[in-house]
Image (cartoon, rainbow, N blue to C red):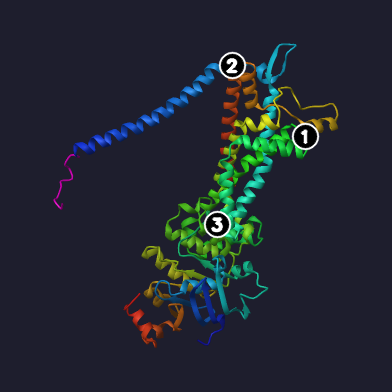
């Protein structure tokens, strides 16, 4: 991994009140690659993902020590504007969460939030984002219809389009395919692979085949610790830690 | 215990009777409610409509000319509704937003919620007493519609806070997260995602509050007066404003009381009742329509 590091965590500890959810996590995530975070439920992988755009701030009683640097700046630093950070580091959630508005307004929501007005400009952003999320052809004739009428897979791709519309640098995907059928899942996997030429993608997944298919690097979490991290191929063919081997061979999970 | 029963076997006699009885009871309850409603509305219309006339609606009463009229009461009613809503909407929705979206001290929030719940269940005559002592006397508004409106603000604020809070709580957390994750500030998120999704509840709160305002008599008798003469108007601007803010008089509900209990004039009391029903209907429909419009935008 000689590529440029975009996000680097050092000695990251996170507590939910008394629960020590992340223990001394240090990891350097390279730019323009897909990094998969795997591990059993409750291992801290989603928690770690949410520290990267500070969505954990919403949880009462959360405490964090250590540092996370994004392009060399501490994202938990004193002067950080969280809205700016989240504009740079977008997120797609486990369950598709389109707003109860039209498809167009969903995609235009982010740009409008960041002050972009003007129909021509917004039209262009909406089309580009929907195309990038590979859903344009399916929705171009119904942009003014409610987004809630779309299927689950379409909703999730719409959410990806919505995230892309603010032109982020990094996209966090929190088990974004776990509620979808295999066809929708493979569409989103293809999408992720296409997006990595322009974006850095970090995805949490329960599905080890998915990690193998899609990701360049894999990080294995267990009980709040980062057990092993490296190139996906290497992790799945020659895991160095016994616990990683046990997990990927399906001995627990 | 484990015998295989045929799924086409008839239900036991006991279960059949039980099913039948429950169904009959539920039907009876529903029928009773419908009958009551039909009877109530029918009776009011039957007694009231014949006594309604354009003159009754559009004039001020005059003993000398022998004219009965409730125009002042209608205006007073609208005045009190608008004056109360102007205060409770921003205050009520604002506090509800604070309590559900901003407040971090959960214990304090639950204490406040308990207090508002208790307040909303308090008999209105207590608000009447307090309103009279505070707004009419201490603040010095005297017996006036404005003092009445302030007393009604105290009374209806808990209702609108609670209903707004309940509807804010039904907005899925995922909407909030989705908005914040795109880089929205908190207020932007609330304004663009949370409030539009909870507009139904806010409208319901308004309807309930208007219902209580229109239906309230005790509070207004104590604080706003029982006169049926026109309190608005004036030849000069200063006088007009003075009258506007100092106006006292009866709302429709209080007028109904005056007709029925002080004058034993039931014909006109029922005519007022018809007007009250019509106002309640129109306001409910208008609020629903406004809610739909707001939701679309």
**Label 3, label 1: how many angstroms apart (C-alpha)?**
46 Å
The residue furthest top is B65
User: Which stretch is magenta?
Assistant: B1-11
Foreground residue, A82 or B78?
B78
Q: Determine the main secondary structure of the stretch shown in magenta.
A: loop
- Report in which chain the residue with disc 3 lies: A
> On what subunit does the disc labeled 2 rest?
B
- Tell me where residue A118 appears, x and y as whole percent: 66, 56
Q: Nearer the viewer, mark 3 or mark 1?
A: 1
Find disc 2 in the rendering and name its residue: B266
Task: Tell me how far mark 3 sits from mark 2, CA to CA.
Answer: 58 Å
For the point 60% across and 64% down, which residue is it?
B183
Q: Nearer the viewer, residue B228 or B207?
A: B228
The answer to whether residue B3 is magenta is yes
Q: Mark 1 — residue?
A: B245
**Which residue is identified by label 3?**
A106
Q: Nearer the viewer, residue B297 or B21?
A: B21
Residue for point 71% across, 11% down:
B66
Mark 1 chain: B
Residue B17 place in picture, x, y as percent: 24, 34
Q: Secondary structure at mark 1?
A: helix
């Amino acid at each position: 991994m000689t590529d440029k590091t975009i996000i680097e965590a050092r000695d990251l500890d996170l507590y939910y009140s008394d629960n020590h959810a992340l223990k001394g996590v240090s990891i350097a995530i390279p730019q323009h690659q897909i990094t998969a975070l795997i591990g059993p439920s409750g291992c801290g992988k989603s928690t770690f993902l949410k520290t990267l755009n500070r969505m954990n701030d919403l949880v009462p009683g959360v405490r964090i020590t250590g540092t996370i640097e994004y392009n060399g700046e501490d994202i938990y630093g004193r002067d950080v504007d969280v809205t700016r950070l989240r504009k740079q580091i977008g997120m797609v959630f486990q369950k598709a969460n389109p707003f109860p508005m039209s498809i167009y307004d969903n995609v235009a929501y982010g740009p409008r939030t960041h002050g972009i007005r003007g129909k021509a400009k917004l039209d262009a952003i909406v089309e580009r984002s929907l195309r990038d999320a590979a859903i344009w052809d399916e929705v171009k004739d119904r942009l003014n219809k409610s987004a809630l009428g779309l299927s689950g897979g379409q909703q999730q791709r719409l959410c990806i389009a919505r995230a892309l519309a603010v032109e982020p640098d990094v996209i966090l995907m929190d088990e974004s395919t776990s509620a979808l059928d295999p066809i929708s899942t493979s569409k989103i996997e293809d999408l992720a692979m296409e997006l990595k030429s322009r974006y850095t993608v970090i995805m949490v997944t329960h599905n080890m085949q998915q990690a193998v298919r899609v990701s360049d690097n894999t990080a294995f979490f267990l009980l709040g610790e980062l057990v092993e991290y490296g190139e996906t191929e290497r992790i799945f063919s020659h895991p160095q830690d016994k616990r990683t081997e046990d997990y990927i061979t399906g001995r627990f999970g | 215990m484990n015998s295989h029963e045929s799924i086409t076997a008839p239900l036991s006699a006991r279960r059949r009777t039980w099913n039948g009885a429950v169904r009959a009871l539920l039907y009876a309850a529903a029928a009773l409610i419908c009958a009551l409603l039909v009877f109530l509305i029918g009776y009011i219309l039957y007694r009231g409509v014949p006594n309604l006339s354009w003159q009754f609606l559009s004039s001020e009463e005059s003993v000398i000319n022998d004219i009965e009229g409730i125009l002042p009461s209608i205006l007073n009613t609208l005045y009190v509704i608008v004056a109360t809503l102007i205060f409770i909407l921003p205050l009520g929705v604002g506090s509800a937003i604070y309590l559900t979206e901003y407040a971090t001290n959960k214990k304090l929030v639950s204490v406040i919620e308990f207090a508002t719940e208790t307040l909303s269940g308090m008999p209105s005559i207590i608000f009447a007493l307090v309103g009279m002592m505070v707004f009419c006397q201490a603040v010095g508004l005297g017996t006036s519609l404005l003092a009445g409106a302030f007393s009604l603000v105290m009374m209806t604020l808990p209702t609108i806070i609670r209903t707004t809070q309940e509807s804010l709580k039904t907005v899925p957390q995922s909407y909030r997260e989705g908005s914040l994750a795109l880089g929205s500030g908190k207020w932007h998120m609330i304004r663009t995602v949370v409030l539009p999704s909870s507009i139904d509840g806010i409208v319901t709160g308004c309807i309930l509050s208007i219902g209580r305002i229109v239906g309230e008599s005790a509070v207004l008798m104590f604080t706003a007066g029982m006169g049926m003469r026109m309190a608005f108007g004036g030849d000069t601007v200063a006088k007009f404003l003075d009258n506007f803010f100092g106006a006292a008089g009866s709302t429709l509900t209080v007028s109904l009381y005056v007709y029925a209990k002080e004058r034993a004039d039931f014909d006109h009391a029922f005519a007022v009742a018809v007007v009250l029903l019509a106002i309640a209907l129109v306001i409910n429909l208008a609020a629903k329509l406004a809610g739909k419009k707001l939701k679309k935008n």
